């Protein structure tokens, strides 16, 4: 993971701890065995942004659980801005021993529970494009907004949207 402060996990309170950046080449089994060999123990792995993990990496995490008796806590979004399961999330759902949806109180602008993450280009919702988008500032201003299913499907923004567009 690469947090705002570098290769570490940090909070707004200033608490931080080292982290390992995950890219498609990272092998979780090798990482776990290496950590255990150098530190004598490994009790758990905390994996963030797991929706971006490859199928192979998710399967490696399962083997870490099964072969090393290490708990794995994987966090991430289920669906992308198109409303489709991320491949990493799909594989996690397929093979996980347990699944717990976190009870985050995310709300759509209308007050209903937010179940979808809308991608906006210059304030207008889009439904297609690359799943992973690096905003380099050369194209439309890209933002994301949590919405209920109804407003995600309709693409309807809340009453404050026009005010935000005018300020942008």
Image: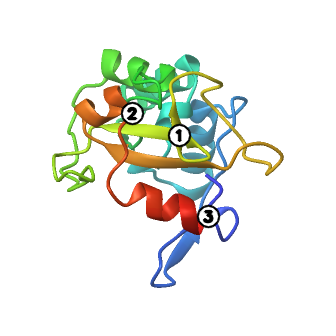
* Residue 10, position as x, y percentages in the image: 53, 71
Q: Residue at x 35, y 38 (%)?
A: 156
Q: Which mark is residue 5?
A: none
Which mark is first along the chain, 2 or 1? 1
Residue at the disc numbered 3? 168
Q: CA distance from mark 1 to mark 3?
A: 13 Å
In the rendering, which numbered label is found on residue 155? 2
Q: Residue at x 73, y 46 (%)?
A: 135
Q: Determine the secondary structure under disc 1.
A: strand
Task: Choose the circle earlier in sequence order: 1 or 3.
Answer: 1
Q: Furthest-bottom residue in view?
A: 13
Sequence-wise, the earlier of marks 2 and 3 is: 2
Query: Which mark is on residue 124?
Result: 1
Could you tell me if the residues under marks 1 and 3 are in contact, i.e. CB atoms within 8 Å? no
In depth, the one of 17 and 44 nearer the eye is 17
Q: From the viewer's perspective, is 108 left or right of 73?
A: left
Front residue of 13/85: it is 85
Please say whether residue 47 is visible from this viewpoint. no
**CB contact under 8 Å: marks 1 and 2:** yes
Q: Is residue 52 above or below residue 129?
A: below
Q: CA distance from mark 1 to mark 2?
A: 8 Å
Question: Could you tell me residue 24's position as x and y percent?
Answer: 69, 29
Q: Position of residue 45 (x, y in %)?
A: 44, 47
Colour style of the rendered protein structure: rainbow
Q: Is residue 157 left or right of residue 30?
A: left
Number of residues whose C-alpha sits closer than 10 Å to that of mark 3, classed few (under 14), some (14–19) or many (20 or more): few
Q: Residue at x 27, y 37 (%)?
A: 115
Badge 3 element:
loop
Instruction: Establish if 94 lies above or below 161.
Output: above
């Amino acid at each position: 993971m690469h947090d705002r402060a570098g290769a570490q996990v940090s909070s707004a309170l200033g608490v931080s701890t080292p982290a390992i950046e995950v890219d498609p080449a990272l092998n979780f089994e090798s990482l776990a065995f290496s950590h255990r060999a150098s530190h004598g123990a490994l009790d758990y792995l905390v994996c963030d942004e797991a929706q971006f993990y490859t199928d192979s990496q998710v399967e490696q995490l399962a083997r870490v659980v099964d072969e090393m008796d290490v708990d794995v806590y994987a966090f991430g979004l289920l669906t992308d801005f198109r409303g489709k399961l991320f491949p990493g999330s799909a594989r996690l759902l397929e093979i996980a021993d347990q699944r717990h949806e976190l009870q985050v109180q995310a709300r759509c602008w209308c007050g209903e529970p937010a179940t979808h993450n809308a991608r906006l280009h210059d304030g207008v919702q889009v439904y297609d494009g690359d799943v992973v988008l690096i905003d380099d500032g050369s194209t439309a201003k890209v933002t994301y907004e949590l919405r209920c299913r109804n407003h995600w499907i309709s693409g309807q923004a809340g009453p404050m949207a026009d005010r935000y567009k005018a300020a942008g």
